[in-house]
Amino acid sequence: MHPPNPSARAQSHTSRPPVPLWLRAVVYSQALFWGAWWAGYLWLPEGALRGSSGASVLPIDHLPPVPRTLAVIAWNLLWMLLFAAAANLVQVRRWPLGLTAVLAMWVIYGLLLGTNSFAVPLPERPSPSVALVLQRSGFMELAAYLITAIATAPIARLRQAGWLSGRTERIIPEPLSAGHRLLLALAVLLVVAGAVREVIQWCGAAGC
């Protein structure tokens, strides 16, 4: 590992790609999400991924609505902190590692929708639909993860030249601006709103 580069911050400003990071993150996430949904819907058997999501291991089925909501919020905040924010301490080729983790989550969620592999499945396998996805709490939660990964991109302290190998150097993190903090606040609000919606839908489908 190489020592911190005093000019790393200046270099990051002068060599930024023409397409902003947030725009690339949004475009990539939605392309992967919708592609995975179509792939799961067309080519995978229904229920093929049931029980494979991280949330499926939570022992919260017996909880009343309020504790269940708090448990879902805590779970999502933990994942958001670890995989969207803390992972951004590392960059690979100037790409925040947290964004890679979040993009993988979008793929998994698309496959879950396409195969109807939820703990409480929908009455029938859903075909890709904007109207449906806007009704699902998972979309709100993943939007929160994506916003968090975008907002915390400046905190990187290590940069590796390649995904599997290459030179690793320390870089100087940039302070989060007021805009970044507002994005993080929005992400937390989305997590809370998503948890409330999830528990309401869960109770409506399976009872509380």
Image (cartoon, helix red, strand yellow):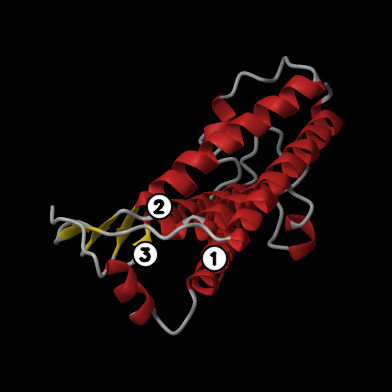
CB-based contact (under 8 Å), mark 1 and mark 3: no
**Percent position of residue 159, x then y:** 26, 59
Which amino acid, mark 3?
A: Trp
Q: 31 or 111: nearer the eye?
A: 31
Of the numbered discs 1 and 3, the one sitting upstream in the chain is 1
**Picture layout, residue 67 above or below residue 18:** above
- Of the two numbered discs 3 and 2 on the same chain, state the one appearing first in sequence: 2
Between 192 and 134, which is closer to the camera in this rendering? Answer: 192
Give residue 121's mark. none
Quick check: 58 above or below 139? above
Q: What residue type is labelled 1?
A: Gly
Give the residue at the far bottom of this rendering: 18
* Residue drawn 46% across the image and 40% down it: 82
Q: In which quarter of the image is residue 194?
A: top right
Q: How far apart are marks 1 and 3 (CA)?
A: 22 Å
Q: What residue type is labelled 2?
A: Asn
| Crowd rating for badge 3 (residues with CA inside 10 Å; few <14, some 14–19, many 20+) | some
Q: Mark 3 points at which residue?
A: 95
Q: Callout 3: helix, strand or loop?
A: strand
104 sits left or right of 166 in the view: right
* Residue for point 50% across, 40% down: 81
Residue 178 shows up from this direction: yes
Left or right: residue 189 compared with residue 27: right
Comparing 15 with 42, the one in front is 15
Q: Residues within 10 Å of mark 1 (few under 14, many from 20)?
A: some
Q: Height in image: 37 above or below 17? A: above
Residue 123: where, in percent of width, then height?
A: 78, 42
- Total of numbered circles in the picture? 3
Q: Name the residue under label 2.
A: 88
* Residue matched to label 1: 35
